[in-house]
Image (cartoon, rainbow, N blue to C red):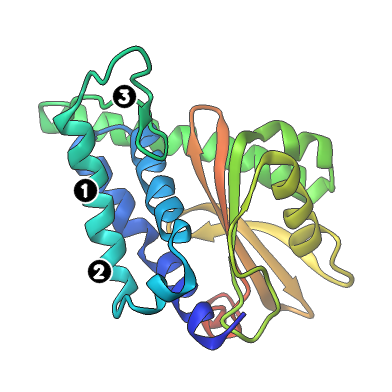
Amino acid sequence: MTEAGAESLAEMLDERQHLLEIALWMFGSDTTADHVVQETYRRWYALDEEERAAIAVPRAWLTRTAGSICLELLADPDPGPDPGQVPGGPVAPAQPLPGPTSHRAGYGQAMLARHERVARRFAAACQAGDTEALREVLAADAIVVSDGGGKVRVAARPTYGAEAVTRVVTALLIDQPETELAMGSVNGRTGLVLRRAGKAVAVASVSVAGAEVTAVWIILNPDKLQRWR
């Protein structure tokens, strides 16, 4: 991966929570928000290298693109026989944002509880080295994105599909000698921390829709692992 490529991928990982918040604010649906973010990334990787290199601020491009996808859904809430589709990929039908504040709080708590359950299934499968259980918790179209910061050799593009994601997660988190894999808090939610000789060498978090993991985000960039050490 080139230094520029590593930097832009790292920026996208940093921006993910912001993009999720944009989509959640507009739709109140974690499923829709997750798909909006994934469609945003799909459009980024649909660009050729020259087009990506011409984007001075990737974060701004991602934010505008996520907003555009949300507006597409709002403008066409009933697109026809397949309401789960938007140009370029699947997105769940928009759901109205709950009304009273107390209802929103309850909705948010339910989302967090669901994320916790699925994330713990994912973490338990990784800790046990159970690749079959790992595949079962992944959505068929799951993706994995990793950030090595140009210092750790990782794929420059996301990997798609449950089988392929299982292989990447196994290679990066499970089949690592002399390491300890434990559940931990990652951005306020359940994730995984991989340590070697007491030092964090990888941190993983997941995006969830329904009872499945739709995306795995793995940080291997040593500069970003300081606070886990």
Q: Quick one: 152 or 98, which is closer to the camera?
A: 152
Identified at 26% across, 21% down, the residue is 79
Q: Quick one: 94 or 121, which is closer to the camera?
A: 94
Assign a secondary structure to mark 2: helix
How far apart are the alpha carbons under marks 3 and 1? 16 Å
Q: Is residue 120 left or right of residue 76?
A: right
Q: Earlier in the sequence, mark 2 or mark 3?
A: 2
Q: Measured along the vertical axis of the image, is residue 120 above or below residue 18?
A: above
Identified at 26% across, 41% down, the residue is 24
Disc 3 residue type?
Answer: Pro
Q: Measured along the vertical axis of the image, is residue 20 above or below residue 120?
A: below
Residue 120 location in percent, x, y?
62, 41
Q: Quick one: 3 or 17, which is closer to the camera?
A: 3
Q: In which quadrant is the N terminus drawn? A: bottom right
Residue 22 location in percent, x, y?
23, 50
Residue annotated with mark 3: 93
Q: How many marks?
A: 3
Q: Residues within 10 Å of mark 2 (few under 14, many from 20)?
A: few
Does the residue at mark 3 contact the one at mark 1 (Cβ under 8 Å)? no
Q: Earlier in the sequence, mark 2 or mark 1?
A: 2
Residue annotated with mark 2: 60
Identified at 66% across, 34% down, the residue is 137
Residue annotated with mark 1: 68
Does the residue at mark 2 contact the one at mark 3 (Cβ under 8 Å)? no
Q: In which quadrant is the C terminus drawn? A: bottom right
Disc 2 residue type?
Answer: Ala
Q: Is residue 214 left or right of residue 44?
A: right
Q: Is residue 66 left or right of residue 5?
A: left
Q: Earlier in the sequence, mark 3 or mark 1?
A: 1
